[in-house]
Amino acid sequence: MTLLLALLEWQDYAIIAFIIYVVGGLAARGDDQRYALRHLDRKLDALLKHHGIGGVSPLSPEVQSLAKDPKQKIAAIKLHRQQKPWLSLADAKADVEQFG
């Protein structure tokens, strides 16, 4: 291990640090996009509710069928999060509980 470190020069460390910085920035950007999508989803739901457009559910038919059964609520929450990866666990749970 020390032999490998002895072979690296300061430029190598700078390149490694730059790569870590770029990858970390891209990961943070993905989190921002998930937050923005969830925010947009909530605004759209509020707009539909305000205009009285009923019957609109954030849950897919598969999730709705699971959410109807109290024993399958955890499976419904898991499937809902798989279908909408930008949702947090709390938001997915709230959606399923609001439906059922």
Image: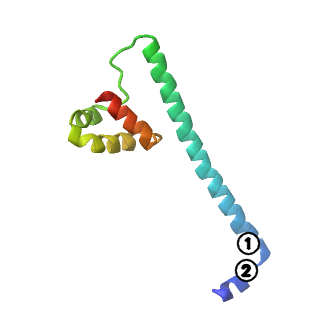
Figure quadrant of residue 72? top left
Amino acid on which disc 1 is placed: Tyr
Q: Is 7 placed above or below 96 here?
A: below
Residue at the image position 72 percent from the left and 67 percent from the top? 15
Query: In the drawing, does residue 28 fall left or right of residue 68?
Result: right
The residue indicated by pointer 1 is 13
The amino acid pointed to by label 2 is: Leu
Give the tally of numbered discs. Answer: 2
Q: Which residue is mark 2?
A: 8
Q: Nearer the viewer, residue 45 or 19?
A: 45
Residue shown at the point (67%, 56%) measured from the top left: 22
Q: Quadrant of residue 90?
A: top left
* Earlier sequence position, callout 2 versus callout 1: 2
Residue 19 point in image, percent of width and height: 67, 62
Q: Tag 1's secondary structure?
A: helix
Q: Are marks 2 and 1 in contact (CB under 8 Å)?
A: yes
Please indicate whether residue 96 sits to the left or right of residue 69 in the image. right
Q: Residues within 10 Å of mark 2 (few under 14, many from 20)?
A: few
Q: Position of residue 94 (x, y in %)?
A: 39, 34
